[in-house]
Amino acid sequence: MLGAVDRKILAKLQGDFPICERPYAEAAEQIGISEDELLQRIEQLLADKVLTRFGPMFQIEEMGGAFVLAALAAPEARYDEVTALVNELPAVAHNYRREHALNMWFVLATETKDGIAEAIARIERDTGLAVYAFPKEREFFVEMKLEARL
Amino acid sequence: MIDDIDRALIVATQSGLPLVPRPYHALAEQLGLSADEVMRRLKTMLETGIIRRIGAVPNHYAIGWTANGMTVWDVADEQVDQLGERIGALDFVTHCYRRPRALPAWPYNLFAMVHGASRDECSAKATEIRSLLGDACRGQDILYSTRILKKTGLRIGS
């Protein structure tokens, strides 16, 4: 269960972390705690896996790279093996199991546009499974900021 | 576009900012730059959109959003962009994209992520999307995630 202070950290710090000499001190002041406490709490939230990361989120397309959502249908008996083969690639930024015939959905993030085709070819070769690529044709909205509700 | 110094900054920060009182100074020292240059470059990357934002990236399961549904829709091509804008503007939709179909296996061309503390909450949100799409919608599904298999974010090589 998250306490009130941790909730406040999640509510206030999913963006707009300052760029200045003492950013944690500045952010801590907004939350009403000390710099030291904020640093300790972030460390604990990371250790508890409430946070997966604390830092910049990059938009690789703005630097000439590509993000592509892709999926495959992994046979149940091979699910763990296929997961390991897919996750092994550094280009796989996220990977989720989903309930559907296409039961593995992952995001490829590569520094060059060609990197996507290479990653897909590698996954198809390693797993022997067809990869479906769903590159975005248009983005309507992205704002992944969810407040804690526990 | 980015230069080698920006790239080194990305490599140094993609797994997280240093958890020390002066994180930008720590990065500067690590990369042999001045702290002013580190901060100036990060600000520029924020302005140009190379950095989407800086802060906490939560594991949404751990903070109570245990039902995560990718709603997918087969929407008439001539209406998908206009309707996509409206779906994306719904406050409970966190991502919304038009993507290619992969026929015959995959007829859906509009993807909208919804989250809830339960599947009922997600399906109520999907119903709301459905009513906005009206006659333009020819098919739909919700793919719930049942496990995070990996969530590291971007990792480019050093």
Image (cartoon, coloured by chain):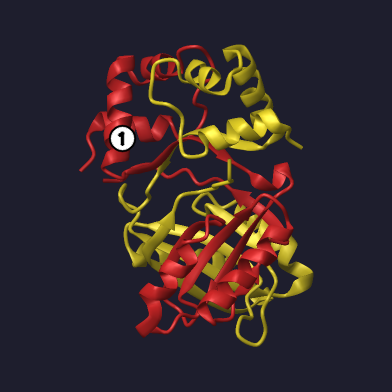
Instruction: Identify which residue, A101 or B144, lies in the foreground.
Output: A101
Can you say whether A67 is above or below B8 in the image?
Answer: below
* Residue extending furthest toward the right: B78
* Closest to the observer, B45 or B8: B8
Q: Residue at x 51, y 78 (%)?
A: A127
Number of numbered discs = 1
Outermost bottom residue: B104
**Which residue: 73% across, 56% down?**
A113
Q: Is residue A122 above or below residue B49?
A: below
Residue that appears at 26% across and 42% down? A48
Vertical arrangement, residue B18 with respect to residue B2, above or below: above
Colour-to-chain, red: A
According to the rendering, which colour does chain B have? yellow
Q: Which residue is nearer to you in this view: A148 or A84? A: A84
Residue B120 visible? The answer is yes
User: Is there any visible trace of residue B144 in the rendered image?
Assistant: no
Q: Amino acid at mark 1?
A: Arg
Image coordinates of residue A51 in percent, x first then y, are 36, 42
Q: Residue B7: horizontal and vertical position, in percent?
A: 65, 35
Q: Position of residue B52 (x, y in %)?
A: 60, 38
Q: Which residue is mark 1?
A: A7
Residue A25 horizontal side relative to residue B137, left or right: left
The chain to which mark 1 is attached is: A
- Left or right: A117 in relation to B18: right
**Closer to the camera, B21 or A31?**
B21
Name the residue: 41% across, 19% down.
A24
SS state under label 1:
helix
Q: Residues within 10 Å of mark 1 (few under 14, many from 20)?
A: some
Viewport quadrant of the N terminus of chain A: top left
Determine the image quadrant of residue B74: bottom right
Measured from the top left, where is residue B39 in percent x and y?
60, 19
